[in-house]
Image (cartoon, rainbow, N blue to C red):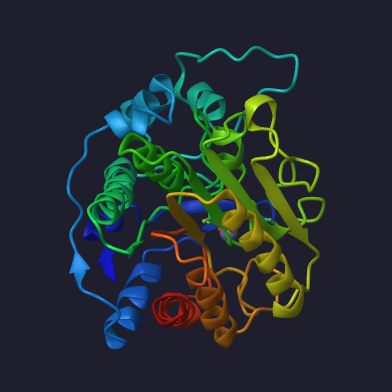
Amino acid sequence: MQIIHSPRHLGHSGHVELMNGRVVPAFEKPERVAMILRAVGERQLGPFVDPTAHGLDPVLKVHDEAFIRFLSTAWQQWTADGRDFPALPSFWKAPGMRAIEPDNIDGKLGHFSFDAGCCIVAGTWDAVQAGADIALTGVDLIADGQPNAFALCRPPGHHAHAGTMGGYCFVNNAAVAAQSFLDRGAARVAVLDVDYHHGNGTQSIFYDRPDVLVCNIHADPMQEFPYFLGYADEAGQGPGEGFNANFPLPWGADFEGWGAALEAACVLVADYAPDALIVSLGVDTYKDDPISQFRLDSPDYLKMGARIAKLGLPTLVVMEGGYAVEAIGINVANTLEGLLQG
Ligand SMILES: NCCCNCCCCCC(O)(O)C(F)(F)F
Ligand SMILES: [Zn+2]
């Protein structure tokens, strides 16, 4: 399995987040990638591949131009008036206020975000562009005949909407990849999001479209971030009706419950018969994840990979979350190994 990654993710370092009302060092830390590289290298799961540059056109197929312009200039605007510390949004619009992009950078940060979990530093935009190129390089490899590939993206992407960042996400790598598969001739693409948190961005981007089936297995948003999307009754709208499926699970879910949801999601994917499958892989479902409440254990990821392999589809795995740094490598490697041996 080709493993695509780039050291440019390191530019997104030294960032913070607002957690429990306090500004703390971000849980989405650079060491996550080093641990994954070490584990997949030790298992010899595949050659490491550098991403090829794809420019912004494929990103602009999914994201709003004003949003991408904002992401590419936010740090310059933030530091223009002397602020040399990480940028965080602080002000958001309530329903009934106007969805206008202000001139003021604090106003822009709020206009283009839905939480204070998307911190921007000097190297963030470069890391985000590399992440999109990593996912797009994975599409190229599979479109050119590889059965699978692993896009080791950082920062993650599945919370990013067409015009909104949040939950550590800026550009939606999985959504950009799905659109690229379609542009390369696929008629249908399925996204299976197994991250602990609902992929609200991916759902919203394809919500009214039948050409991308989006399935999410995640913590019940009544209890857990992102709170305001990810409920079981969200089935798609208009032409997209029936092409979105959410499997929310309660805190404390272990592989017995989680695996049953995976089985149901895999049946939907098989019935949809896509030309390609994208797995938004977060391993924050792990029992010792510091910010999550599921109870999966490391051997469960082997079973997860094996079940996905049984679909027999060209599969692009796109890295999302997972914050138990000491175990993230084992759990990602187990998922990939299960996929390869399935
Ligand atoms: N008490 C709730 C705190 C929630 N804090 C933000 C959680 C962000 C999760 C990000 C992720 O893991 O879904 C991604 F894959 F995008 F990285
Ligand atoms: Zn997550």
**Residue located 51% across and 66% down the image:** 311
Q: In this view, does 189 lie above or below 61?
A: below
Left or right position of 18 against 255: left
**Residue located 32% across and 28% down the image:** 73
Residue 136 appears in view: yes
Please provide percent x and percent y for residue 11.
Answer: 28, 53
Left or right position of 90 against 332: right
Please provide percent x and percent y for residue 173.
Answer: 41, 46
Left or right position of 79 against 233: left
Determine the image quadrant of residue 296.
Answer: bottom right
201 vs 217, nearest the viewer:
217
193 vs 250, nearest the viewer:
193
**Residue located 28% across and 29% down the image:** 57
Quadrant assignment for ligand 2: bottom right
Please provide percent x and percent y for residue 317.
Answer: 41, 61
Please provide percent x and percent y for residue 151.
Answer: 34, 59
**Residue located 59% across and 82% down the image:** 300
Q: In this view, does 101 lie above or below 143?
A: above
The number of callouts visible is 0
Residue 23 appears in view: no
